[in-house]
Amino acid sequence: MSTPIRASSILPGRREDIELHTADGLTLVGELARPLDREPAATLVCLHPLPTHGGMMDSHVFRKAAWRLPALAGLAVLRFNTRGTSSVRGTSEGAFDGAVGEKFDVAAAIEYAEFHELPNIWLVGWSFGTDLALKYGCDPAVAGAILLSPPLRYSAPEDLAVWAETDKPLTALVPEFDDYLRPEEARERFAAVPRAEVVGVDGAKHLWVGDAEKVLDEIVRRVAPGVPLPLPTTWDGPMETGDASAYADRTVAAFADTPVPGPAQRRAE
């Protein structure tokens, strides 16, 4: 009998706690989720939102990716806390460094995926994580990048120029009512990168509350194009339930600016 896939649903997969070791001597905590019964078709390395505003490896889109995509799409999902960031998994050493020292964190994650022979590595950045992907993610081992709600706050035109010189695909998923960068402006800013694709998502906001399924579909569309979409919303096999309440006060991942007016945020999932 099919069971609905809910925010707290954990589908089958091989999950292990991991540690990343940075070139400047820090240990970062994370998790690697892989398919239970097959080798992964591709790998997502997740770069989370701003930790000073609640961002972490368990921010809801990434948590759902790790809990669902190994089973639904055959993907490996690597999540970790950047320096000084805490979650239920633990706290990474170091302190938030405003997208400077975090270059070592990104490098450590890519290196881990390479060393463990994880295939077809894609970066998936969200908010602050998109700046990290743009600044430090154009690595020979990386196949491409997907940016969720890119504010282009810490990254600069020269970072886009680096991506413009490669043939790596770069996709920006931009909410219609984003607080910091909306689709029309995003298309203008990313025009500097010939292979950049900007996808406006109707009705969505910066935090993707209520729209995680759309995001996961768009990620899978690009990294595993053979997987039928939309992804299933029910599951016929065994399923566990995670404690989503542990993250109830950690869903905010925005900047402390005056937001652009838009519709009221939907309730958290």
Image (spheres, rainbow, N blue to C red):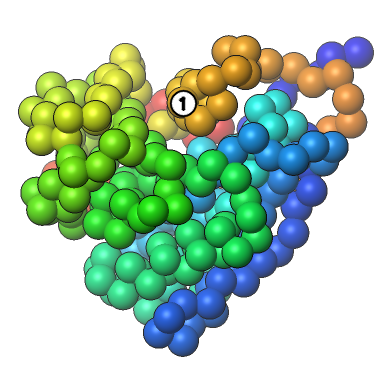
Q: Is residue 1 left or right of residue 166?
A: right
Please tell me in which quadrant of the rendered image residue 203 appears: top left
| Visible residue check, residue 195 | yes
Q: Quadrant of the N terminus?
A: top right
Labels in figure, total: 1
Q: Is residue 253 left or right of residue 61?
A: left
Note whether 181 is above or below 152 in the view shown: above
Residue designated by label 1: 222
Graded by Cα atoms within 10 Å as few (under 14), some (14 to 19) or many (20 or more), the crowding at tag 1 reads some
Q: Is residue 74 left or right of residue 95?
A: right
Q: Nearer the viewer, residue 53 or 11?
A: 11
Q: Could you say where residue 17 lies in the image, as x and y percent from the top left?
A: 70, 64
Note whether 85 is above or below 176 in the view shown: below
- Type of amino acid at the residue the image marks with label 1: Arg
Please tell me in which quadrant of the rendered image residue 164 appears: top left
Q: Could you say where residue 180 lies in the image, as x and y percent from the top left?
A: 18, 39
Q: Residue at x 57, y 57 (%)?
A: 113
Q: Could you say where residue 170 lies in the image, as x and y percent from the top left?
A: 31, 35
- For mark 1, give the secondary structure: helix
Please tell me in which quadrant of the rendered image residue 261 appears: top left
Q: Could you say where residue 36 lies in the image, as x and y percent from the top left?
A: 82, 40
Q: Nearer the viewer, residue 185 or 167?
A: 167
Q: Nearer the viewer, residue 16 or 122?
A: 122
Q: Residue at x 84, y 14 (%)?
A: 2
Q: Residue at x 48, y 82 (%)?
A: 26
| Visible residue check, residue 8 | no
Residue projecting furthest to the bottom: 25
Q: Quadrant of the C terminus?
A: top right
Q: Residue at x 72, y 45 (%)?
A: 34
